[in-house]
Image (cartoon, rainbow, N blue to C red):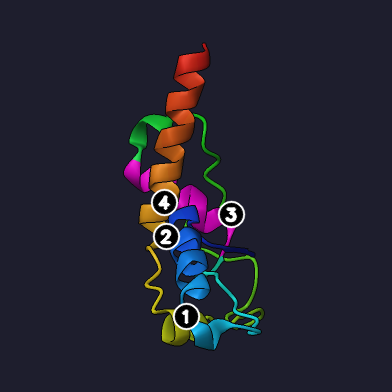
């Protein structure tokens, strides 16, 4: 299970923290949530069928950890900084498309 944050959400959190006096001296977890490699692979396969031959299928729809085995709280980022996190699809599908574009450009 990996914790992640979209770089665009992280940028908003940083700028907002600098301009929010109440954020001074605080430790704020800026992470959307946890996700597994399987969930990321499932998103790629769902949204980019042309990648089926290079994205391992694994065991679609499963997770390697039991529910709640590892959690974080991003409530401070939401309440204090007003961060609204992007969805898994927004984050990973767009990242995948960018990586494919980089790969094509360098070929």
Residue farthest along the top direction in this orientation: 107
Q: CA distance from mark 1 to mark 2?
A: 27 Å
**Which callout, 3 or 2, points at the residue further toward the start of the chain?**
3
| Membership of 16 in magenta stretch | no
> At x 55% / y 55%, what residue is drawn?
38
Residues 69 and 6: in front is 6
Q: Badge 1 is on which residue? A: 20
Residues 37 and 53: in front is 37
Numbered mark located on residue 43 in the image: 4
Residue 6 in the image: x percent, y percent? 48, 57
> At x 57% / y 66%, what residue is drawn?
63
Placement of 84 over or under 101, stated as above or below: below
Q: Are marks 1 and 3 in contact (CB under 8 Å)?
A: no
Q: Are marks 1 and 4 in contact (CB under 8 Å)?
A: no
Q: Badge 3 is on which residue? A: 37
In the figure, is residue 2 to the left or right of 5? Answer: right
| Mark 4: few/some/many CA within 10 Å (<14, 14-19, 20+) | some
Question: In which quadrant of the rendered image does the N terminus lie?
Answer: bottom right
| Membership of 39 in magenta stretch | yes
Q: Main secondary structure of the magenta part?
A: helix
**Which callout, 1 or 4, points at the residue further toward the start of the chain?**
1
Q: Nearer the viewer, mark 3 or mark 2?
A: 2
Numbered mark located on residue 88 in the image: 2
Q: CA distance from mark 4 to mark 3?
A: 10 Å
| Mark 2: few/some/many CA within 10 Å (<14, 14-19, 20+) | some
Q: Nearer the viewer, mark 2 or mark 4?
A: 2
Q: Are marks 1 and 2 in contact (CB under 8 Å)?
A: no
Placement of 56 over or under 6, stated as above or below: above
Part of the protein shown in magenta: 35-47
Q: Nearer the viewer, mark 1 or mark 4?
A: 1
Q: Are marks 2 and 4 in contact (CB under 8 Å)?
A: yes
Label 4 SS? helix
């Amino acid at each position: 299970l990996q914790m992640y944050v979209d770089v665009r959400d992280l940028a908003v959190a940083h700028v907002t923290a600098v301009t929010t006096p109440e954020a001074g001296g605080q430790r704020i977890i800026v992470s959307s949530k946890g996700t597994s490699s399987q969930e990321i692979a499932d998103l790629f396969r769902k949204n980019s069928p042309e990648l089926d031959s290079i994205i391992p299928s694994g065991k679609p729809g499963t997770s390697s950890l039991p529910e709640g085995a590892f959690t974080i709280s991003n409530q401070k980022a939401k309440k204090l900084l007003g961060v609204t996190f992007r969805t898994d699809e927004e984050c990973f599908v767009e990242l995948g498309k960018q990586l494919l574009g980089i790969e094509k450009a360098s070929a």
